[in-house]
Image (spheres, helix red, strand yellow):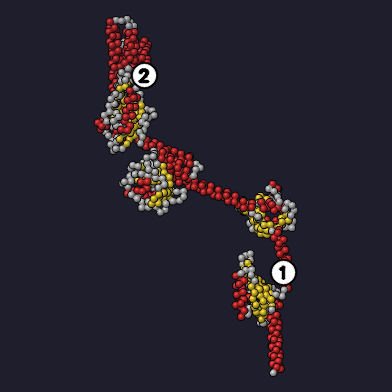
Amino acid sequence: MAAPDIRSTTSIRFLAEPASTPALKPPPAPLGWGIAGVLLTLAVAGAMEGIHQFLAPIPHRMWACLLPVVWASFAAGLRPGSMAAAVAVLYGAWAYGEPGFSAPNLARFGAGALTIGGTAVLVGLLRRRVERAAAAIATADAARRHVEILQELDAVVWEADARSLAFSFVNRRTEDILGLTPEEWLRRFPAWGRHIHEEDRDRALALCRGDSSQGMDFALDYRCVNDRGETVWVRDSVRTLPGPDGRPAQLRGIMLDVTERKLSEVALQEAQARLALVSRVAEQSHGRSTAEIVAVALEELGEYLRGYPVSFSRLETGGRIVVERSLEPAAVPCAGGFSGDVSPAAAWIGCLREGRPAIIADAARDPRAAALRPYLAAGGRAASLDVPLRHPEGGTGILSAGSVEPHDWSDHEVAGIEELARWMETALSEARAEEERRTAQKALAESQAVLYDLFENINDLIQQASPDGRLLYVNRAWRETLGYSVNELRELRVGDILHTSCRERVQAMFARALTGETVRGEAVLVGKSGRAITVEGHLNARIKDGVPQFTRAIFRDVSERKVAEITLKRSEEHFRSLIENAHDLITVLADDGMIRYQSASAAHVLGLAPEAMVGESLFEFVHPDDVAAAEAALELALRDPGVAQKAELRLRRKDGTWRVVEAIGTAMLEESGLRKIIVNSRDITERNEAEAALKTSEDALRQSLKMEAVGRLAGGVAHDF
């Protein structure tokens, strides 16, 4: 700890009186009492003279003035009494000399004058002696009270020689400050300065000698060590007294125990230092990333701890520690990037997980340090102070300080790191949230850009409109399809682009959408050129707190499709009429042989209604002897789509008879991915029967011709013979 500034700025209020209090002088008599004594003497003289002249003669009336003279001497002192005596003597001279000074009167006058004057002097001297005795008593009492005050004063009052600084007096309050009696104090500290802490002594002596040699009063704060070895802070207010030659002769001082105030001041200074640490880090970390905040915090913490190595680590769930950043002095090995398993240090980990700092003053003696040896060795640390905090990425973060030598971590150092860790926990969490927010904003902006690009380049028509029908946004396909520019959209409303044939219906759709319903349907829009455009899609609204904000719609231009559908419908109707009037059986089968469609000719050929056959398996109508052939033909058709497969089958009529058909099937793949087989079957029962009859006739003819040839041959042979 650095040596403190010992000069005090407190003004000196020196309470001690000189060691030898001078005798108190009797207070001067009040002037009024002296005047009153003289006037009383004159009054008595006048009264006696009046009585003598007008009532009855009084031969020795001068003696009546003795009483006021005595009162004046006792009440006002020797000088007022002498003045009153002088008035009485003058009156006596006039009284005895009125008929003329005879020898007897002169003797009487002399006796009266001596008596009155002597009495005045004696009474005045007696009063002065009484006053001096009272003053002596008061002086002794004052000295006693002064000593009592000095002894009972809640401070050490002392006196020392200004040249040698040797103590000549200390009061008994030395027991309260240093636990020493005045006698023990004087034996242990014969001179001023010996009682001062060795770290403050030289400067205190230099200050004392410098100021006292110039006759200056001074005050200073310094430390002492009491009989229990405890440090005590003292404020010493010193007054320099000159000697008869004008040079400094004595030093008198008051020592006050200011330990509690000093500790409060130190605590305040330490709290201010910690606040300044956090304030500097907070000021430099504003708007920075988590990594930058950690770097700033470590730099400021290193300065706060006067160059101790510091680091920030992460303790993972499995007991693995990773040093993410460190700040080490040049002479200390760098622990940055260290990672290792500290799970054996269960006590150390438990302390951190509970939110308490883990303090190791001497790694060689602390049993917890054995399992932390790789972690401590990475930074060359013999002592460590590890404070936990919540890591911004989850888990336990560790703000650490170390020392290459054993070190007893002070409360100030521990409190400083704890306060910084608490601030970092909040700041890192906020910075992490800010980073995530910025990342989300960036992703949102990119997503919005992608969506905007998608909306602008999609072939569907997209529009956004306010509840009152004003168009807020339309995409490129919408603008190109309807032929409006961006500037023209500002004055355009949804009703302006609706065809009269569907305006009421579409407006009703918009009203339903504003209630929160998603509406699907078709509409006919009118482009800028007047061309009617048929669209289909869906429409809904964004509703917040029950209030619709805007409507959004996605439409697809189906004008060409509508034309194609009409054409297709006409074509289908045409071909349907052909199919319905054809004599051949036209059947659509699923890949499992299930009948999905049957033409109307089934009623003529098989005597069955077409709808009675739909949903039934084809094999239900095939002759049992022909099922295998039918299945084989179906399998070949499915194996080679588009290739026609032929088979001759017998199908059961409604009346139980069989009709022979020639079936040609072709497999096709639908848009939905399902396979279907279209089978065209022709009834060849009559043809087969005709062919059979013809064959019978031909066989008979052939037999007849053969018999005829044999007959001719036999006739020829007979003729030859």
Q: Quarter of the image containing the C terminus?
A: bottom right
Residue 575: numbered disc: 1
Q: Left or right of 284: which side holds 22?
A: left
For marks 1 and 2 on the same chain, the one whose residue lies earlier in the sequence: 2
- Tell me: residue 448, above or below residue 607: above
Q: Residue lying furthest front in this view?
A: 720
Q: Determine whether the residue tagged by mark 2 lies in a helix, strand or loop.
A: loop
Q: Determine whether the residue tagged by mark 1 lies in a helix, strand or loop.
A: helix
Which quadrant would residue 74 be assigned to in this image?
Answer: top left
Q: Residues within 10 Å of mark 1 (few under 14, many from 20)?
A: few
297 or 423: nearer the eye? 297
Residue at horizontal 29%, vertical 9%? Answer: 109
Residue type for callout 1: Phe
- Tell me: residue 77, above or below residue 396: above
| Residue 246 in view (yes/no) | yes
Q: Position of residue 696 (x, y in %)?
A: 69, 85
Q: Position of residue 398 (x, y in %)?
A: 41, 47
412 or 118: nearer the eye? 412
Q: Left or right of 331: which side holds 137?
A: left
Q: Quarter of the image containing the N terminus?
A: top left
Per the model, the C-alpha gap separating discs 1 and 2 is 154 Å
Identify the residue under disc 2.
30
Q: Residues within 10 Å of mark 2 (few under 14, many from 20)?
A: few
Q: Position of residue 87 (x, y in %)?
A: 34, 11
Residue at horizontal 63%, vertical 64%? Answer: 671
Q: Left or right of 403: which side holds 641?
A: right
Q: Left or right of 447: which side holds 48?
A: left
Q: Nearer the viewer, mark 1 or mark 2?
A: 1
Which quadrant would residue 595 be assigned to in this image?
Answer: bottom right
